Image (tube, rainbow, N blue to C red):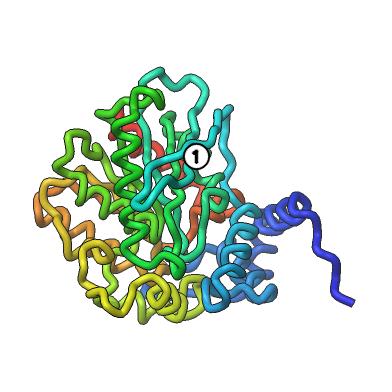
Amino acid sequence: MPTPALPPRLEAAAARGLLNLPAPILRLLAGTPIVRDGQTLDVQTQLLLRLQRLQGNAALGGRDPAHERRVMDAQCRLLEPRAVGAIQTRAVRLSGGAGPIDGRLYRPDGAPARAPALVFCHGGGFVIGSLDSHDGICRALAARAGCVVVSAAYRLAPEHPAPAAVEDAVAAFRDIAHRADSLGLDPTRLAVGGDSAGGNLATVVAQQTADDDIAPAFQLLFYPAVDFAEDRESVRTFARGFLLEKASMDWFHGHYIPASMDNRDPRVSPIHGRLAGLAPAHIITGGFDPLRDEGEAYAAALAAAGTKATHRRLPSMIHGFLNFAGAVRGADAAITRAAQVLAEALR
């Protein structure tokens, strides 16, 4: 008979405890260090990947989207980062491209009546991910940056292929900007951000709203997907074995971008869009991420166009590391550092 599943809270505690065993035991369980491109994979992450392979969840995507959504939500809740301090959370309805969409507002205790804010789009390849999968990330960013975070639940593919997600993200940002007073936000200090697919959407929002009366003041982009037209060397170097695989990327691409749409369309590949005159950007990439090189190319392209852009590579991290920050020390430190950058930018 199959072994009964542990209750989620116990499963989370067991996973966190296992990943925080003493270093020699971690190394023994994880196996021989993995070195690629002159970088060594984080030992906690290596063990996590081994555990996921044993559970049959070695890579993102590939199965029925509804099943993949359930898997992602469950996995993210296990190891999501923890917020320090009280966070007031409430549901909000936001304007989308074809009607209202769901959102969630996170306000840390002590935030001013007109608080700086981050409008956040979750990752998940435009097919999976939700407000719930990234709830811990939004709480942690709000707590550590001392700003409000507003998370927007854009429409997902394949039910709603591109450019539906873009239309929702842009409409949501404009709605939040124009309702800033009623939401308790300072419209002059609104940042956009997200991870992976959400980083893609945040870049497009920054491009499409740059000339609005209320434009983004900053971009915080975690391992963004910015180019569906070209596979760079990191896609080949990390094609298998590090959660986001080349096969995963093809699966997401096939669901998200219709055959009639040009892969270079700036609405899906913002590296081919407007680069000058945008809000300053801070881009974080992972050394073991197939998307590493395009994120770094985007930072370079912004700088070359005169937009202020800073970049930080975390050489031992994989794609999606934010979702493991409740147990992986390097990922948790990355959130803290990114929150400090965000707080300084919106000060």
| Left or right: 100 as drawn, with respect to 189 | right
Any part of residue 321 in sight:
yes
Q: Residue 92 or 99: which is nearer the viewer?
A: 99
| Left or right: 163 as drawn, with respect to 279 | right
Residue 238: image location, x then y, percent? 42, 77
- 305 w.r.t. 261: above or below: above
Q: In which quarter of the image is residue 2?
A: bottom right
Residue depicted at 21% across the width and 71% down the height = 264
| Left or right: 290 as drawn, with respect to 242 | left
Residue 193: image location, x then y, percent? 35, 47
Q: Residue 220 or 329: which is nearer the viewer?
A: 220
Residue depicted at 32% across the width and 42% down the height = 173
| Left or right: 301 as drawn, with respect to 247 | left
- 145 w.r.t. 247: above or below: above
Any part of residue 33 in sight:
no
Tell me the residue that label 1 is attached to: 104
Check disc 1 and give the amino acid type.
Arg
Q: Residue 146 or 286: which is nearer the viewer?
A: 146
Q: Quadrant of residue 296?
A: bottom left
* Furthest-right residue in this view: 1
Residue depicted at 50% across the width and 63% down the height = 128
- 83 w.r.t. 272: above or below: above
Q: Quadrant of the N terminus?
A: bottom right
Neighbor class of circle 1 (other Cα within 10 Å; few <14, some 14-19, many 20+) is many
Q: Is mark 1 on a helix, strand or loop?
A: strand
Residue 166: image location, x then y, percent? 32, 56
* Furthest-front residue in this view: 99
Residue depicted at 24% across the width and 37% down the height = 217
Q: In which quarter of the image is the C terminus?
A: top left
